[in-house]
């Protein structure tokens, strides 16, 4: 096993899944953007279930191999690229690294345990926030790319950004909006696992005149539109919630539902935390405070510092070197004792 010299770039095989420029794919983008120039050579292996568009976000940083059930491509990737370390975001990446005696790190993105992400096989598993408590050896707080400051602000408009499936509980958001007559809503997203028509749901609550639904938008456009709002609402436990953090860097205050997720810590000092039943009151209270752009910029600066992609990448770079060094020393010990 090769041990890179000081100052030499590390070869990282980044193993992830199809994400349509969201989720783990966005994580890979932020990580690569934050990494010091020349520190890493990337190869991306994507378990592809959604067609050729998958992984496009990563192509600017290195080659992308889409497996699509072709296991021979995985073997070729390991053999041709000869990675120094595997960064797994799915269990199979860490498993293949262990099988080949290659140093590995896995990132645990969810709160329900790390097996699915590779914690059982990786040399060390990393949670994306303190809310990830199971099967992790340490935490590296998620980093994001700050958004541009909006050219205009609609302070009474509340953003919903993300999926509209049952687990995201958009009904709670619409119920809360119905109780706050001074508020309007901008809803961006669609349901992937059920039929959910925001316009029909708004009409049933008598708030059609206060709800604009844009459906699914490309990530950059979705963030640009949502950044004009005064508030952003999150109704579920999230291990991190990078869309909320990104919008905070554009001055959008968070209003979140209480729970075990990191959204509570994210809102601390800047937004509101409420029960599902109290969400309407929290939105109303936040709107009544009528934050100035100066207050929003103070929040944005704090969020930019706390959730810096450069800080995250530097921590991962140190971890790559640590696990490579640890694996190299272990192999040396095996060779020495094996020769006696």
Image (cartoon, rainbow, N blue to C red):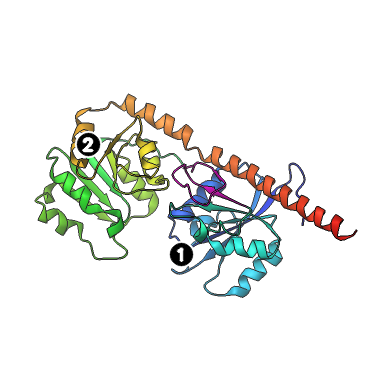
For residue 315, which numbered disc appears in the image? none
Question: Residue 25 at what x, y percent from top left?
Answer: 48, 55
| Element on which disc 2 rests | helix
> Residue 84 vs residue 314: left or right?
right
Image quadrant in which the C terminus is located: bottom right
For residue 282, which numbered disc appears in the image? 2
Query: Gap in Å between the C-alphas at discs 1 and 2?
Result: 39 Å
> Residue 122 vs residue 332: left or right?
left
Choose between 329 and 219: the one closer to the eye: 329
Residue depicted at 53% across the width and 56% down the height? 58
Residue depicted at 55% across the width and 70% down the height? 67
Choose between 219 and 300: the one closer to the eye: 300
Above or below residue 188? Residue 301 is: above
Image quadrant in which the N terminus is located: bottom right
User: Would you say residue 132 sits in the magenta stretch?
Assistant: yes
Residue 262 placement: quadrant: top left
Contact (CB < 8 A) between labels 1 and 2?
no
| Element on which disc 1 rests | loop
Q: Residue furthest left?
A: 206
User: Would you say residue 303 sits in the magenta stretch?
Assistant: no
> Residue 20 vs residue 104: left or right?
left
Q: Which residues are magenta?
A: 124-144
For the stretch drawn in magenta, the main secondary structure is loop
Above or below residue 151? Residue 166 is: below
Q: Can residue 64 be seen by looking at this rendering?
A: no
The residue that disc 1 covers is 53
Question: Residue 224 at what x, y percent from top left?
Answer: 35, 44
């Amino acid at each position: 096993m090769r041990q890179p010299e000081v100052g030499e770039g590390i070869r990282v095989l980044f193993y992830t899944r199809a994400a349509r420029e969201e989720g783990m794919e966005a994580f890979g983008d932020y990580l690569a953007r934050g990494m010091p120039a020349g520190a890493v050579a990337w190869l991306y292996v994507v378990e592809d279930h959604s067609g050729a568009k998958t992984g496009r976000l990563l192509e600017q940083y290195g080659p992308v191999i889409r497996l699509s059930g072709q296991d021979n491509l995985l073997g070729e990737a390991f053999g041709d690229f000869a990675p120094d370390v595997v960064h797994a975001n799915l269990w199979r990446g860490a498993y293949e690294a262990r099988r080949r005696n290659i140093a590995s790190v896995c990132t645990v993105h969810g709160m329900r345990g790390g097996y699915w992400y590779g914690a059982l096989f990786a040399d060390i598993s990393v949670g994306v926030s303190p809310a990830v408590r199971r099967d992790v050896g340490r935490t590296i707080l998620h980093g994001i790319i700050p958004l541009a400051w909006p050219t205009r602000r609609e302070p009474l408009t509340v953003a919903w950004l993300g999926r509209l499936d049952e687990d995201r509980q958009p009904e709670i958001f619409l119920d809360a909006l119905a109780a706050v007559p001074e508020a309007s809503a901008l809803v961006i997203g669609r349901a992937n696992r059920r039929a959910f028509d925001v316009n029909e749901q708004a009409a049933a609550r008598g708030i059609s005149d206060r709800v604009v639904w844009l459906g699914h938008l490309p990530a950059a456009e979705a963030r640009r539109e949502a950044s004009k709002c005064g508030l952003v609402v999150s109704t579920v436990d999230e291990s991190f919630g990078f869309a909320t953090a990104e919008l905070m860097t554009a001055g959008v205050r968070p209003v979140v539902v209480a729970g075990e997720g990191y959204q509570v810590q994210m809102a601390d000092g800047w937004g509101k935390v409420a029960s599902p039943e109290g969400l309407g009151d929290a939105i109303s209270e936040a709107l009544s405070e009528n934050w100035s752009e100066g207050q929003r910029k103070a929040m944005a600066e704090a969020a930019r510092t706390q959730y810096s992609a450069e800080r995250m990448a530097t921590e991962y770079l140190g971890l790559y070197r640590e696990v490579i060094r640890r694996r190299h020393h272990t192999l040396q010990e095996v060779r020495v004792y094996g020769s006696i």
